[in-house]
Amino acid sequence: MSRPMVRVRRRALRRAWTWPLVVGLVCTLTWSSPAGAGPSHTGLKGALDKILADPRMDGGAVSVVIADATTGERLYRRDGGSRLMPASNTKLATSAAAMAVLGPDHRYTTDVLTTGRRQGSTLVGDLYLRGSGDPTMLAADYEQLAADLAASGVESVTGRLVADDTRFDDQRLGRSWAADDESAYYSAQISALTLAPDTDYDAGTVVVEVTPGARPGTRPKVGLTPPTDYARLDITATTVEKGRPDTLSVSREHGGNTLTVSGSVPVGAAATKEWIAIWEPTGYAAAVFADALADQGVRISGSPRLGHPTPPGARTLVSHRSMPLKELMHPFIKLSNNMHAEALTKTMGLRVSGQGTWDAGLMAVGDQLKKEGVTTSTIRQADGSGLSRMNLFPAEELATLLLSVRDAPWYADWYASLPVACAPDRAVGGTLRSRMCGTPAALNAVGKTGSLTGASALSGYVTDAGGRELVYSMVLNNHLASSVKSIEDAIVTTLASSDTAAGTITAVPPRLSRSAEPASGLECAWQKPKFC
């Protein structure tokens, strides 16, 4: 019986693809609140209730909270205590806890060690490659480790290369992650020893690039980044006449690393890039490092051994240190990187309890949330990224977290990692870079996006027209529309356009735009090409 195939289909990468936001007409409405009236009687309530009455949310579930960022006063609540699936808004909890538990200057280390002895240029014994969970290790970093080892005078190793990933447990995939996402790069396996193919730091993946042949009937050219024999290519695709349909597909078998390139690609078509999650990232990292050693003239016998701990007393020969956490936060949050969230979760477990597991890490996150005043009895967090559909958060608790962290010593670094509305630079705007353009929210609102099929969320900060900083959190669930992002945008734009203290509310109705999420319903940063 043939093994099941997990299929991933992408079009050619176009990182700069954005669409302008279509903004609707606005109307300025001024209400005078009756004496003693609470927030539920203000004009803001009428404006936001009307936005949330959008037909796309008929039969859906809504949890929305707006608060004064300085005083914490709740200005608007709509089912704020309802527990809904937050998607990538889960990363707000994970990232804030990581900054508090690990510290903004935390760095991962990847070490090459031995218990052996030197005899001239020969190392007698095994060579250990030990990871600590760094999701930003590139092939170039492994090449530098190999070069540094060679520069120390080592030319041969009598033992084997041993890959030590034991800082984390061997549970590779999170709870309730979808089986049909197994080879998707946003659902890659988690290991303490891994490798990213690009500076988005998509750990545990390889990039497959396919270029059509010169004429119909020829095989397309296929390459891997990084080049590695750890993944085997099975190319059945063919080049077809110009103008014919592009049916190219790349799939990975379950339980292995045979990548099948099938379908057809027309002559003259642009190169197609597919990001594919690797089966067993520890072996992937070890294979790339072994190749780098060979390139540096360092001979080592046998194939790498995986999953064995480095013996006590081993001495470090060479080492690589990652960027500090405050810098890692940018690709993590701006691009909503799932693998960063899960690596940080297990790292927190290792720091707090000595166990690099999801359970220990999530306990550490929960303990930190309690310190921030979050009522953790009202939430359920099943992973660090929000990929699990078991996660449940009320908007009230997300708003509480956003308010509480403003006093943290690391807040400025954390705040800087949030996507900025309509900031065109991908490293600044991230998943919000094509949203709310041409409105008062542009370059003003910051926030964390979230998307899964039937779930959308946006939480962050915005300054209103009167100079008042507001916290907003909205979680929308059970909608059948492919996207409800324009509803979120209308709420944030209404806040940015209004003087909430004076009660002058400029209501902005939702309008559909080409910058909305793709029909898959996944977080826009999980799409290659990027749709946001």
Image (cartoon, rainbow, N blue to C red):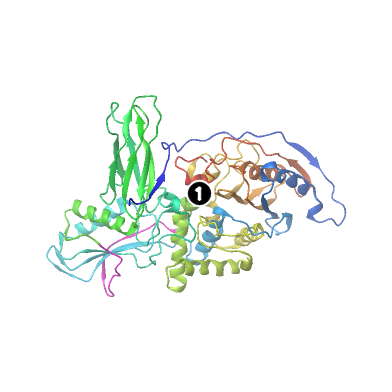
Amino acid under disc 1 = Lys
Q: Position of residue 229 (x, y in %)?
A: 25, 49
Q: Is residue 179 left or right of residue 404?
A: left
In this view, which residue lies farthest toward the front? 1
Please tell me in which quadrant of the rendered image residue 492 appears. Answer: top right
* Res 499 seen here: no
With 248 as the anchor, is 519 left or right in this view?
right
Residue found at the far left of this picture: 120
Question: Over which residues does the magenta segment extend?
Answer: 305-324
Left or right: where does residue 283 sit relative to residue 28?
Answer: left
In the image shown, does 180 or 367 lie closer to the viewer? Answer: 180
Quadrant housing residue 315: bottom left
Residue wearing tag 1: 334
Above or below: residue 35 compared with residue 367: above
Give the x, y percent position of residue 106: 43, 63
Residue at x-position 34% and y-position 58%:
280
**Quick one: 336 or 470, which is closer to the camera?**
336
Residue 503 visible within the image: yes
Q: Residue at x 41, y 64 (%)?
A: 171
Q: Magenta includes 322?
A: yes
Number of dots carrying numbers:
1
Callout 1: SS: helix
Disc 1: CA contacts within 10 A as few (<14), some (14-19) or many (>=20) = many
